[in-house]
């Protein structure tokens, strides 16, 4: 029962806008960690010479880092704005819902995750 | 309906902001770089100077080729000297902070181990063979650095070496039937010779020596023989015996030549820059790049000079072109190139110093020189022509 309660409490995480924000937030420490690794092996210069331990580390890390950076710079602002807007609309929709079911109203309308 | 509307709304928001936010975010430093803000230049200077303090040597690089390792170490020191010199010329109050770093870098550059890659290629140390007629054009990089150091300190300890070196390079250039001298036996690279010409020009500026006739003749030779007639770009390599093209005209060589040539002939530098911009500049969503080969070229090769080439855009050409855009007042191009630098160079600031994580020591040094190059430091000599 205790587990079910915890899962229930975390159910809000499954809502698309919240999940989007959590995933984007997780990318930030990923970028920092990858930056640290890339700087430590010498950056792009590690890819110029023969294949060795440095280039094996630098190649994938640099590729991942650039992907993460492109997502954060090009996609994150729009995703954050869309998610924030959706959460705001859901909150307003929930606020407008009547406390009791009144004739002519539908209490199930509004946010998909506001139940 | 919501199932369709939500993804569409999210996608529309992402696309709308992708056209606005990244160019603003990555272009926040453009104004500072464009007007030579002292704090922005100081961050770059501290980042590059830290590499000199830590002792960059040929062994610091891992290109897999000792010659390239040696070249990279020499160019790292050269770019730091040029960059710090440009910073000090723009902000004289920083001279006491950076003069010792410049002096240290110059001392390291003239050490035998720093020039070993040239010694091994020629079988004799270039600085010990100044009376000979062999090319040793790689010494143009050293001579440029010496020129900048002397511009800041006319009584520097290496003044005599600077005079002898530039005299030797000028004599070799004059005696060459093609106005080109070899970097290594059987290898002649016009971009390297542009460093020689720039060094001669800067020597004239630092000492008052008149190199007018030689530089005018060299500029004329470049215009008539070493630029691709179609693109106007500089040939990357020519045959030592005949001066005929031995490689394509490329973005990386032309972009660095725009910078070096500015110390000798600002008009030629501008012409090369215009060709580079017309034939190789490309933009996407406000981010700019310089192609290694012109747009209408079928070539797509990359080598140690070009650095990685992605979708035709060369890393070296793009980085070097920043100097040209600053020297020749092309604010729009500077803006788009700096955005690209910010996006892919991964700038990291700590303790008042900026490092570009993807570039390492060489990248920091080059970016210092390119982002601080300007009309005030480069074009004066050319204006006298």
Image (cartoon, rainbow, N blue to C red):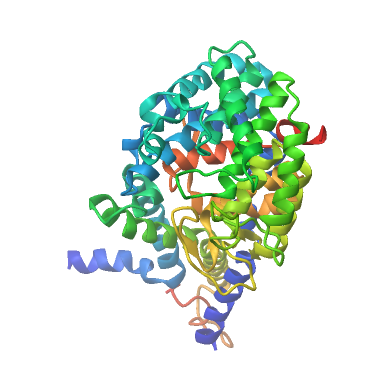
In front of the other: B218 or A87: B218
Quadrant in which the C terminus of chain B is drawn: top right
Residue B45 placement: quadrant:
top right
Quadrant in which the N terminus of chain B is drawn: bottom right
* Residue B65 seen in this snapshot: yes
**Residue B171, how many percent across, how many down?**
63, 32
In front of the other: B222 or B70: B222
Q: Is residue B305 left or right of residue B244?
A: left
Q: Is residue B53 left or right of residue A73?
A: left
**Residue B73, how many percent across, how many down?**
42, 36
**Residue B234, how many percent across, how many down?**
64, 55
**In the depicted structure, whether residue A96 falls above or below residue B113:** below
In front of the other: B126 or A25: B126
Residue A78 placement: quadrant:
bottom right
Q: Is residue B35 left or right of residue B100?
A: right
* Residue B332 seen in this snapshot: no
In front of the other: B364 or B115: B115
**In the depicted structure, whether residue A1 falls above or below residue B203:** below
Total marks placed? 0
Taking the spot 56% from the left edge, 26% from the top edge, the residue there is: B165
Taking the spot 82% from the left edge, 32% from the top edge, the residue there is: B384
**In the depicted structure, whether residue A27 falls above or below residue B176:** below
Taking the spot 57% from the left edge, 29% from the top edge, the residue there is: B143
**Residue A30, how many percent across, how many down?**
36, 54
- Which residue in the rendered view is the most extreme toward the right? B384
């Amino acid at each position: 029962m205790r587990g079910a309660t915890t899962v229930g409490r975390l159910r809000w995480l499954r809502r698309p806008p919240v999940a989007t924000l959590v995933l984007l937030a997780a990318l930030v420490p990923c970028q920092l960690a990858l930056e640290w690794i890339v700087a430590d092996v010498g950056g792009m210069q590690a890819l110029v010479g023969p294949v060795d331990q440095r280039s094996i580390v630098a190649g994938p890390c640099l590729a991942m880092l650039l992907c993460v950076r492109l997502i954060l710079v090009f996609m994150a602002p729009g995703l954050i704005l869309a998610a924030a807007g959706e959460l705001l609309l859901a909150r307003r929709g929930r606020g407008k819902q009547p406390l009791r079911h009144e004739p002519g109203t539908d209490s199930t309308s509004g946010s998909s995750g506001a139940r | 309906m919501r199932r369709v509307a939500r993804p569409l709304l999210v996608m529309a928001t992402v696309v709308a902001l992708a056209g606005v936010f990244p160019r603003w975010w990555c272009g926040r430093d453009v104004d500072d770089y464009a007007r030579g803000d002292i704090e922005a230049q100081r961050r770059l200077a501290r980042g590059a100077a830290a590499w000199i303090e830590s002792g960059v040597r040929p062994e610091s690089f891992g290109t897999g080729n000792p010659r390239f390792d040696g070249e990279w170490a020499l160019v790292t020191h050269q770019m730091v000297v040029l960059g710090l010199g440009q910073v000090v010329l723009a902000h004289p109050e920083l001279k006491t902070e950076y003069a010792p770093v410049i002096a240290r870098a110059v001392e390291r550059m003239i050490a035998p181990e720093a020039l070993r890659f040239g010694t091994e290629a020629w079988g004799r140390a270039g600085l010990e063979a100044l009376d000979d007629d062999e090319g040793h054009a790689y010494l143009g990089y050293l001579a440029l650095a010496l020129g900048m150091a002397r511009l800041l300190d006319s009584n520097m300890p290496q003044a005599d070496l600077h005079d002898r070196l530039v005299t030797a390079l000028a004599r070799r250039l004059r005696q060459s039937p093609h106005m080109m001298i070899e970097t290594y036996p059987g290898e002649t690279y016009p971009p390297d010779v542009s460093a020689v010409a720039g060094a001669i020009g800067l020597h004239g500026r630092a000492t008052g020596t008149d190199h007018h006739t030689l530089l005018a003749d060299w500029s004329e030779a470049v215009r008539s023989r070493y630029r691709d007639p179609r693109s106007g770009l500089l040939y990357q390599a020519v045959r030592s015996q005949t001066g005929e093209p031995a490689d394509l005209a490329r973005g990386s060589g032309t972009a660095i030549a725009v910078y070096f040539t500015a110390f000798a002939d600002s008009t030629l530098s501008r012409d090369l820059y215009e060709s580079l911009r017309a034939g190789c500049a490309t933009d996407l969503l406000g981010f700019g790049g310089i192609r290694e080969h012109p747009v209408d070229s079928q070539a797509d090769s990359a080598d140690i000079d070009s650095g990685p080439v992605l979708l035709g855009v060369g890393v070296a050409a793009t980085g070097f072109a920043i100097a040209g855009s600053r020297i020749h007042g092309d604010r729009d191009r500077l803006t788009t190139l700096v955005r690209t630098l910010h996006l892919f160079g991964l700038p990291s600031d700590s303790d008042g110093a900026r490092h570009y994580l993807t570039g390492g020591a060489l990248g920091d040094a080059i970016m210092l020189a390119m982002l601080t190059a300007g009309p005030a430091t480069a074009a004066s000599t050319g204006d006298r022509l």
